[in-house]
Image: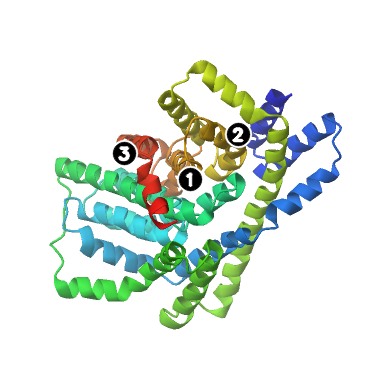
Amino acid sequence: MILWIFLGLITLILLGMPASFSLGIVSLVYLSINGINLSMIAQSMSRGVNSFTMLAIPFFFLAGELMNTSGVTKRIIAMSKVMVGHLKGGLAQANIVASIIFAGISGSATADTAALGSVLIPAMEKEGYDKDFAAAITVASSIVGPIIPPSITLVIYGIVAQQPIGKLLVAGLIPGLLVGLSLIIYTYFYAKKKDYPSHPRATFPEVKTAFSKGISALVMPLIIIGGVMSGIFTPTESAAMAVLYGFIVGFFLYKNITIHNFFGTLKSVGLASVNTLFILSTATIFSWVMTMARVPDYVVDLMFEISTNNIVLTGLLVVVLLIVGLFMLPSQALIVLTPIFVPVAIKIGIDPIHFGIIMVLTLVFGGCTPPVGMMLYVASDISDLPFAKLVKAILPMYIPIVIAIILVTFFPQISLFLPNLLF
């Protein structure tokens, strides 16, 4: 029965049915066949979203949207140029650093690709970079968006896996920087091979000007990370403070937010938040069904039949997640797989905080791989580049990203150093 339920779930998602309805339908089928009172559906859905922690999701959405509407993108790019523009392939390096900074504002890979790509891809092409490389590095660097806090994806994992959100957000910082560093190293050698230009090293007045104009963009991630790390705020409270800061910056500092576009922002954030929370409510039912059906136990038994070596089993989990990421959106895959894989990870000795970083990193990597890769489609549309040509250009960039994934997976302290230090 469980096999049929999984096949039904995958079929419904691949046919384009929203993940929330797909999860709800297969859970309803299981409960009906087993004669379980269907009032459990309403109770589980209500319990799934009746949480103070859940408020972090709409707050993080709103904080990111307010800063985006404020027009911080060009300021972030200017800061990135003075930091790394003197390296070989300067504008490409600035693209990567800008993605890291932007990640601390939006927490979204797709938003990162759209906001930075629309500015940097034409600018890189104008400086002599191949368009396909410019689009590819924009996509590749944007995967740090859901890893560096604030991360909606890590919040979703924490809620489904019942793990502390603060630890997860802090744990994502070093792995996100590691992914960015791996791409910086790759870009340096690729730019030398292609003889891409670099900018003159920025003078002190130029650095001062760039940071004075863009420092407000760095304050938001400091509020979130600093508030959580210091214990002053819970993750939800830090998200609320980030919204307040975004409101002040947009209305009074940059003056790019008006009453009209503010209400438009509230509408888009409201729709995105309701969609995410509805998925989480139906995921609660699905998680309960998986527990009742003892699916995690079956998966553990199956994996231990393959091997009893924890390193082999960890590698197998990573391979499965990478394959799933090719065909499912990260949020969907997290909601479906977390209730099943977290007990397996704990059984083979993986810390659930560390495993959360592994899950998010591997599944987000799917966003820059065909056939589902959303960032590829966004960059293809922005750059007016054929999808196949963009995929061909990004293929070599998978190497540094996969190396970073392997390092994060098999060296747990990369993820756990900060949480263990601070909590």
Disc 2: which residue? 340
Furthest residue to the bottom?
A: 252
The residue tagged 3 is: 397
Spatial separation of the CA atoms under disc 3 and disc 2: 31 Å
Q: Looking at the image, is 276 positioned above or below residue 290?
A: below
Give me the residue at 46% from left, 33% from top. 322
Mark 2: few/some/many CA within 10 Å (<14, 14-19, 20+): many
Q: Nearer the viewer, mark 3 or mark 2?
A: 2
From the image, state whether disc 1 or disc 2 is nearer to you.
1
Q: Quadrant of residue 273?
A: bottom right
Q: Earlier in the sequence, mark 1 or mark 3?
A: 1
Q: Which amino acid, mark 3? A: Met
Q: Label 1 neighbourhood size at 10 Å, few (<14), some (14-19), many (20+)? A: many
Front residue of this view, candidates 146 and 170: 170
Q: Nearer the viewer, residue 50 or 81?
A: 50
Quarter of the rendering containing residue 412: top left
C-beta proximity under 8 Å, tags 1 and 2: no
Tell me the quadrant of the picture where the N terminus can be found: top right
| Element marked by disc 1 | helix
